[in-house]
């Protein structure tokens, strides 16, 4: 029965193709199938052409970014360039917004022109990852009044004054004070205990370690002043005016160059 059925089907096709009407129907079906295949191919081609022509903005390294460089310093130091590239040339995970770099550090060296990707960065580690190449972190120990212990905190900005004894030519030494550096960021603070360096239990004698973010050219001067003189931290407000970086303050300048101090205080 199965053989008969197959033979019958084949005979039907032969009869259909032997007629003009049947031939037209088969040709029409073949034409429709071919047209469908052609439309599908054209749509795929058009999609590929459109995609390859689209541009996408990515961030690329403007120079060598060393392993461990913080994303925040990359953003603030403009160590990148915003570039438009063809979509098909965009690296997987490419970064287009510097906000994605916050709190992260470079996991390996990133070379000039290389696209910044999510895989290039990991969660930041220690303090060194918060510093730009020209920045240094230095810790000094200050007493309560000189370091404003309990009032200055991480994230604040301060002016740093230094006082040392100077010995003019042919004269005796005298103390002098001057602004050493202005608008310095406080990275960390931490008390060393109520006794401090003097061993007293008086809270007024407590000392605090203060870590400051300074330029590489400033670290030596601050270390010298801390070891050989006195250092004061002066807290700056958020909208601080420019600090006065005039010459050193001495007994002579106070007596001869300063205005009288009012008894009522300033308003």
Image (spheres, rainbow, N blue to C red):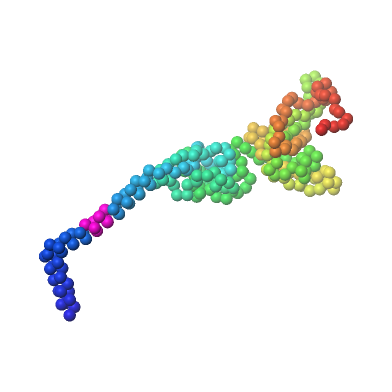
Residue 36 lies in the magenta stretch: yes
- Tally the numbered discs: 0
Q: Identify the image quadrant of residue 184.
A: top right
From the image, give the main secondary structure of the stretch colored magenta. Answer: helix
Q: Identify the image quadrant of residue 175.
A: top right
Residue at the farthest left position: 18
Q: Is residue 233 left or right of residue 213?
A: right
Q: Is residue 237 above or below residue 25?
A: above
Residue at the farthest right position: 263
Residue 166: x %, y % from top left: 78, 26
Q: Residue at x 53, y 48 (%)?
A: 121
Say which of 75 and 136 sits in front: 75
Kindly tell me whether residue 68 is visible in this rendering: no
- The residue range painted magenta reads 31-38
Q: Identify the image quadrant of residue 68.
A: top right
Residue 168 lies in the magenta stretch: no
């Amino acid at each position: 029965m199965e053989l008969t059925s197959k033979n019958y089907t084949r005979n039907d096709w032969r009869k259909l193709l032997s007629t003009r009407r049947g031939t037209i129907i088969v040709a029409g079906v073949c034409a429709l199938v071919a047209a469908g295949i052609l439309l599908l191919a054209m749509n795929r081609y058009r999609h590929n052409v459109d995609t390859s022509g689209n541009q996408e903005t990515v961030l690329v390294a403007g120079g060598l970014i060393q392993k461990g460089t913080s994303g925040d310093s990359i953003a603030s130091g403009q160590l990148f360039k915003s570039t438009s590239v063809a979509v098909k040339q965009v690296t997987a995970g490419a970064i287009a917004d510097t906000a994605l770099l916050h709190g992260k550090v470079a996991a390996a060296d990133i070379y000039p022109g290389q696209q910044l990707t999510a895989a290039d960065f990991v969660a930041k580690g220690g303090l060194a990852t918060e510093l730009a190449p020209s920045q240094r972190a230095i810790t000094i120990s200050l007493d309560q009044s000189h370091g404003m212990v309990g009032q200055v905190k991480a994230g604040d900005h301060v002016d740093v004054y230094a006082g040392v004894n100077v010995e003019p030519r042919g004269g005796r030494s005298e103390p002098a004070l001057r602004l050493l550096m202005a608008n310095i960021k406080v990275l960390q603070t931490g008390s060393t205990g109520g006794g401090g360096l003097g061993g007293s239990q008086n809270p007024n004698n407590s000392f605090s370690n203060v870590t400051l973010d300074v330029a590489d050219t400033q670290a030596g001067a601050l270390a010298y002043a801390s070891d050989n003189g006195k250092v004061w931290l002066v807290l700056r407000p958020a909208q601080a005016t420019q600090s006065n970086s005039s010459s050193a303050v001495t007994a002579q300048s106070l007596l001869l160059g300063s205005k009288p101090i009012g008894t009522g205080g300033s308003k």
